[in-house]
Amino acid sequence: MKTRRAPFSGFSPLTLPPAPRWPKTTFRPFRHKPAPMRDESLPKIETETLADLRDEIDRIDHEMHALLMCRGEIIDRLIAVKGQTGASAFRPDREARMMRGLVSRHKGLLPVDTVEGIWRIIVSTFTYMQAEYSVHADDSGGDAAMRDSARFHFGFTVPYVTHHGAGAVVAAVAASKGDLGMLRSAGAQEEGAWWTRLVGEDAPKIIARLPFVERPNHPAGLPVLIVAKPLAESASQDIALHALSLPKWHHGAPAAIDALAGEILATAPHAGELSLLVAAPGHVTSAHFTSELARAGVGRVSAALVGSHAARFELDTARSGVFAPRS
């Protein structure tokens, strides 16, 4: 039998060919730089359109209206708690603090005149809802400035009633349940010492001085005094007002009054004597004036408290109709 031979390979079966010598290389995989991923929590920066801005204004207007209605509901609950006594719901001390806080924190391009005017209408109208009242004003010195002041501070819902003379205003307030009277801070000089009508425990009293926030070019900057029947909740005692009666004018009176940090607001003859309306810090009493004037040799002096109001609050002018408080 013949044996088949394997094909000749050129090598011994026990000898392997040398490994091929390939050139040395370094493997560098292809590095693909992925696109950055967007953080969805970041706000999208888009160009606002006029329609977008108008929609935002409409949303704010709806929210403001809703808040006003909510305020009205609270007034209903307030009336239920307090009851309607017919007495004035005007709280000048609280409103003075409210206006001071409002203008002090205000910023931006909206004029403070507008902001204060809006708040005065809101506050006075809701006060009217608690207890209806009228504002009686003395127009003997001209009606335009008094009307502007009344409308700015009390709005158009509250009735505005004019009288010719301070005495008629005080009499109207005295005959009412809870009306307010508005008089120029100097009063009507042709009527004499109108403030003497405020002497007495049950007589009307001065409870406020407007405007609450004084500044140059105020749209209702006429200084006025607000008169009302004595309040169940006392008015601010920052500044007290006194009616002083002197036998006659004495050169030592101004210095004696100034020694108590007092200010003479008005003078007029009354019942054969001289009557003074004087403002002073709340801690100064009528007795202080009588004793100080007696030491000055003025003679027999009588004094009576006729009201009080919050301290004057003034602002300086600033740009764009916005004002900053004095430091």
Image (cartoon, grey):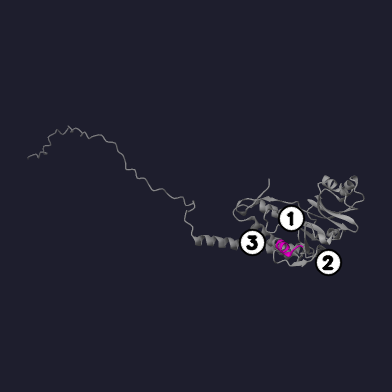
Residue 252 shown in magenta: no
Pointer 2 and pointer 1: residues touching (CB < 8 Å)? no
Q: Position of residue 202 (x, y in %)?
A: 86, 60
* Residue at the spot 64% in from the left edge and 61% down from the top edge: 67
Dot 2 or dot 3: first in sequence order is 3
Dot 3 or dot 1: first in sequence order is 3
Report the residue marked by disc 2. 175
Instruction: Give the vertical position of 63 relative to 24 (above or below).
Output: below
Q: CA distance from mark 2 to mark 1?
A: 26 Å
Q: Amino acid at mark 2?
A: Ala
Pointer 3 and pointer 1: residues touching (CB < 8 Å)? no
Which residue is situated farthest in the right direction here?
Answer: 300
Q: Nearer the viewer, mark 2 or mark 1?
A: 2
Report the residue marked by disc 1. 94
Q: Position of residue 15 (x, y in %)?
A: 17, 32
Report the residue marked by disc 3. 67
As helix, strand or loop, the secondary structure at mark 3 comes to: helix
Main SS type for the magenta part?
helix
Q: Which residues are magenta?
A: 141-149
Q: Quadrant of residue 203?
A: bottom right
Q: CA distance from mark 3 to mark 1?
A: 21 Å
Where does the C terminus fall, quadrant-wise? top right
Q: Position of residue 113 (x, y in %)?
A: 65, 57
* Residue at the spot 60% in from the left edge and 61% down from the top edge: 63
Q: Nearer the viewer, mark 3 or mark 1?
A: 1
Report whether residue 194 is seen. Answer: yes
